[in-house]
Amino acid sequence: MTQASDMPQRRTFARIGHFVATRRKLVFDYFSAISGAGGRLVFSLAYFIALANTLSIAEFGMFATASAAGIMLSRILAFGFISALYRTATIRPNLIGTFTAGFLLLGALSLPFLAAASYIVYLIFFSGTVPLSAFAAVVFAEALLWRPVEVVLIVNNGLGKFGRAAVLAILTTALRAVGAILFMLAAQHTIAVWSLYYIGANAASLIIAFAFFYPRQRLRLRAELYFRRLADSLYVAGSEVLFYLQMEFDKLLVLSIGGPHLAGIYAIIMRLVDLTAIPIRTFSMMLVQRMMRAPELLSRLAVKSGIEGGVFLVSTLALMSLGIVLHFFPNALGKNVAEAAPLVALAVCVPGLRNLVEYQAELLFARGQTAVRAINLGLLAGLKAVLLTYALTTIPDTANLVLSLNIVFLLLYLASMLLTYSAMRRPAKAI
C-alpha cells in the first residue's frame, strides 16, 4: 500500500525534474548563444568606431552602402542552398557532409549569376560614386569570404553547439575590428585601401572558421537530394535577396538621391540602429529552431504579442540609452560620429519596428512557407522604396528626414504584420 501510494508522488517529482532539466538546458543554450552576441556587439562597436572615424563621412557612406549591397548579393551564393544545410544540421545532422558537398557544387554554379547581378547593381546605384574595383572588392569580401563564415555559424547553431558558434562569432568580429585598427595606422585612408584590409580580415575569418569550427564529415555528392530541395532553396534565395533589399534599400536610395555625405550620416545612424538587433537575432534564431520542430509554438495570441512587445521594448531602450549617452557626450564615438549624434535619438522607434519586421520574416522561414515569405518580402521592398523615395524627395532637412523614418518603419511593420500573420493561418509545410 505504501509503495502504491508513493507512485503518483514519484511521477510528479519526475515530471518536475524533467521540466527543470529541460528549461535549464534551454537557458544554458540561450546564454551560450547570447554570450557570442554580447562579444560580437563589443567588437562590432570597436570596428564601427575605428572605421567611421578613419574614412571620411562620404567614403564611409559609400562603403556602408556597397557592403549592404554585397550582403544582399551574397544570398545568391549556392542559390540559397544554405537553408537546406541549416535544416539538415537542425534535424538530420548525419547528412551534413552530403549537404556541404551540395553547397560547394551549387556555390560554384552560382558564381556567374552572382557576378552578373553584382555588375547590374553597380551600374544602377554605384557607377557615379564608387570605383568599380572598390565595389567589386567589397562584394567579393561579403559574398565569397564572409557568407561562408556565416555558413559555419549557421551549421553550429543548427547542431545546438551555441558555445562554439559564440566563440567563432566573437573571433571573426574581432578580426574585422583588428583590420579597422590596422587601417587607422595606414598611410592612406581611402575606400580603395580599406577594401583590401576588409578582404584580409574576412579571409582570415574564413580560414579559422573552416579549419577549427566546421564539423568533420566526409563530403558525398548526392545530386538527387539537392535537386529535390532546389525549388525551396531558390525561394529562400529570392526571399533573402528581397529581405536584404527591403532592409538595406534605404542606404541605396540615400546614396542615389542624397549623395555620399548624406549617405554617410544615414549609414552611421543605421549602423547604430543595427547594433541593437544583435541580441534580438540570437533570440529569433533559437525560436526558429524550436518552431522547425513545433510549428504551432506561436498559436496563442498572448505568446505572439508578448514576444513582439519584448522585442520592441528591448530594441527601443537600447537606442534610447545610446541617444542619451551621445546627447551628453557627442564625441564618445569619435569626431565623425559626433556629426550624426544629435540625430540618433530622433530614430527612437526605428530599431524596434525594424527588428520586428526581420523577426516576422523568420517566422515564415521556420514554418517552411518560403514562397509566401518571398512574395511578402517583395511587397515590403516595394513599399519601402515608395515611402523612402517620397521622404527623400520631399523633406530637405536631415533632422526631419530622420524623424520621418519612424512613420516609414511603422507603416512597414503594419504591412509585415498583416502579411505574416495572415500567412500563418495556413498549415505549416513539412520540412
Image (cartoon, helix red, strand yellow):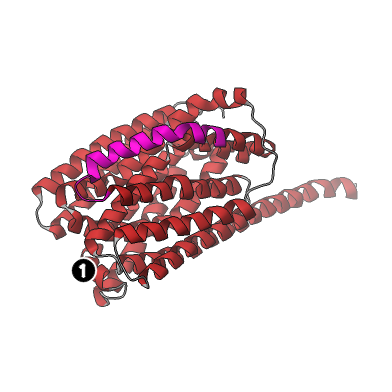
For mark 1, what is the residue? 339
Residue 80 located within the stretch drawn in magenta: no
Q: Does the magenta run of residues contain 114? A: yes
Q: How many numbered markers are drawn?
A: 1
Give the residue displayed 60% in from the left and 50% down from the top.
Answer: 210
* Amino acid of disc 1: Glu
Instruction: Check disc 1 and report its element: helix, strand or loop.
Output: helix
Q: Is residue 48 left or right of residue 85?
A: left
Up/down of 365 relative to 332, above or below: above
* Neighbourhood count class around disc 1 (C-alpha, 10 Å): few under 14, some 14–19, many 20 upward: some
Q: Position of residue 196 (x, y in %)?
A: 39, 58
Given residues 5 and 395, the one toward you in this image is: 395
Q: Nearer the viewer, residue 118 or 12?
A: 118
Q: Position of residue 64 (x, y in %)?
A: 31, 54
Q: Which residues are magenta?
A: 104-131
Report x, y in % for residue 314.
39, 59
Q: Is residue 168 left or right of residue 275?
A: right
Q: Quadrant of the image for the C terminus? A: top right
> Main SS of the magenta segment?
helix
Q: Is residue 320 above or below residue 362?
A: below
Residue at 83% over, 46% down: 7
- Residue at 44% across / 35% down in the picture? 111
Q: Quadrant of residue 4?
A: top right
Between 19 and 93, the residue placed more toward the observer is 93
User: In the figure, is residue 379 to the left or right of 7?
Assistant: left
Residue 347 makes an appearance in the image: no
* Residue drawn at x 30%, y 55% as measured from the top left: 63
> In the displayed structure, does residue 287 sit left or right of residue 335?
right
**322 or 153: nearer the eye?**
153
